[in-house]
Amino acid sequence: MSYVILDLEWNAAFYKKEQRYINEIIEFGAVKVDDELNITDTFSTLVKPKIGKRLCSKVKELTGLSLDELKQGVTFAQAVESFTEFASDSVLMTWGTSDIHALIENFYCFFGDRHITFLHSYCDLQEYCEKSMGLYDKSAQMGLSVCAEKLGVEFCEDDQHRAVADAVLSLKCVKELIGQNPLEPYIQNADCERFYDKMTFKTHYISDLSDPQIDKAQLRFFCEVCGRRAARVTKWKRRNRSFSADFQCRGCGNRFGARVSFKKTFDEITALRKIIPKEKPKTENSSADGNA
């Protein structure tokens, strides 16, 4: 089995047909490795922009590329054809899923089909490294350079943000962890609609407490003082992404506020809960003691 670690660079370009910005791919860079993660081949090509008429200043700064250089590149269709031959039946690996999102977007834009011709099996190296290091957090994903620093992998900052260099750095990070955690459990089938549905799913917060997907048990709160179940004493009010209400303990009478939100991802709904203590009103005696 062979593996191909792909990295893409792209430029924010306004797509007039759909009146929105897309991440137009401007560079492919990849390394092919064998079962022992030895590099057997490399791939690099610049892609001539078709939608964007200029490069974002941030893209210029990070990549060092110019529009004149890109104009000497190949078309997106030519880049895809060449990379499909290069990748063959290898497992495709990227750092995070943003490159996959960009590919889906570009394939749909240029070919009218979201299916990526060279993608059959896929592995997210960002998820692999984070879980291998015990640092997996859906809400705070780790950047490639941060991962390299934590693993003690040496790299030159000036070389990053170019496709091949980032692909090589991803490989170095994996090599530091492969001895303690195999890649195989992280490889998923990408030749199915479920893969694309998951990749294109927009994570959102549920805005209606009557939604049948919500676990109503998450709306129950218990007193932090005595542990008994508290009674809700006000209606749920929605504010931004969350719902809030006041509660009072049935046992000790402790009053507190509660806040809950429901985050919907493709696979699950995550309830984010928080208890907010209520300040006890000052009595006349406590005020007098404070002034004594």
Image: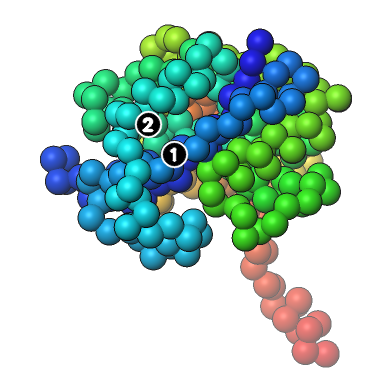
Apparent side of residue 279 relative to residue 117 in the rendered image (left or right): right
Within-10-Å neighbours for mark 2: few <14, some 14–19, many 20+: some
Residue type, label 2: Ala
Apparent side of residue 134 relative to residue 98 in the rendered image (left or right): right
State whether residue 47 appears in this view.
Answer: yes
Figure quadrant of residue 200: top left
Quarter occupied by the N terminus? top right
Alpha carbons under labels 1 and 2: distance apart: 7 Å
Q: Which of 112 and 224 is in front in this view?
A: 112
Say above or below: 19 vs 91: below
Q: How far from the left and from the top, in percent, is residue 68?
A: 32, 57
Dot placed on the residue nearer the N-terminal end, 1 or 2: 1
Q: Nearer the viewer, residue 221 or 70?
A: 70
Apparent side of residue 9 relative to residue 129 in the rendered image (left or right): left
Figure quadrant of residue 211: top left
Looking at the image, which residue is at 47% across and 64% down? 61
Q: Residue furthest left?
A: 17
Looking at the image, which residue is at 69% across and 34% down? 171
Identify the mark at residue 79; answer none if there is no mark: 2
SS state under label 1: strand
Q: Is label 1 in contact with label 2 (beta carbons under 8 Å)?
A: yes
Residue type, label 1: Thr
Q: Nearer the viewer, residue 176 or 286?
A: 176
Say above or below: 103 vs 57: above
Q: How far from the left and from the top, in percent, is residue 116?
A: 38, 21
SS state under label 2: helix
Identify the mark at residue 45; answer none if there is no mark: 1
Q: How far from the left and from the top, in percent, is residue 49?
A: 28, 46
Q: How far from the left and from the top, in percent, is residue 195?
A: 45, 17
Looking at the image, which residue is at 37% across and 31% down? 79
Quarter occupied by the C terminus? bottom right
